Image (spheres, rainbow, N blue to C red):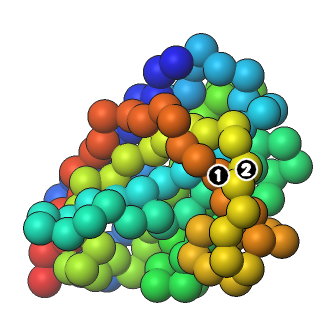
Amino acid sequence: VQLQASGGGLVQAGGSLRLSCAASGLTLMYYALGWFRQAPGKEREFVGAIIWSGGRTKIVDSVKGRFTISRDNAQNMVFLQMSNLKPEDTAVYYCAAGDRAVQTTYGSDDDMGNGFRYEYDHWGQGTQVTVSS
């Protein structure tokens, strides 16, 4: 399994970036692909995900309205479109894949619907996003 994230960079506050994640070596219809980020000195946090089969997406409230997730079925790629970026979005962004749905708190950040989240077992290498003020 390979997950190759790209598209990070340095951008001014208010700018946009689109992160890409190319997935190979797995049958995507059984997976959710997620985006996570980790800022310096902070724990990794879930940003959002897409369930490949059906295309259901989830974006956490803290970035809702600014970030969106989409996919390209033909190229086995998932994207994180980020707009109106803020300095607090500075982090290493990771894509991950998981095929195990487990229960979570209904309505929590990682709830993909009906109180289930995914366990992510496969991780990409991360791409740095730096937002200057």
Q: Quadrant of residue 13?
A: bottom left
Which secondary structure lies at badge 1? Answer: strand
Which secondary structure lies at badge 2? Answer: strand
Identify the residue under disc 2: 101
Residue 41 locus on image (x, y percent)? 12, 67
Q: Residue at x 26, y 65 (%)?
A: 43
Residue type at mark 1: give it. Answer: Tyr
Q: Residue at x 42, y 57 (%)?
A: 36
Label whose residue precedes the other's in the sequence (2 or 1): 2
Residue 2 locus on image (x, y percent)? 47, 21
Q: Say if 64 sits above or below 76 in the image.
A: below
The one nearer the camera, 108 or 76, is 108
Residue 25 locus on image (x, y percent)? 59, 15
Q: Say if 29 sits above or below 16 in the image.
A: above
Residue type at mark 2: give it. Answer: Ala
The extreme right residue here reads 54
Q: In the picture provided, is 29 more to the left or to the right than 22?
A: right
- The numbered dot on residue 118 is 1
Q: Quadrant of residue 102?
A: bottom right
Q: Residue at x 67, y 60 (%)?
A: 117
Q: Residue at x 67, y 69 (%)?
A: 104
Mark 2 in CB contact with mark 1 (< 8 angstroms) = yes
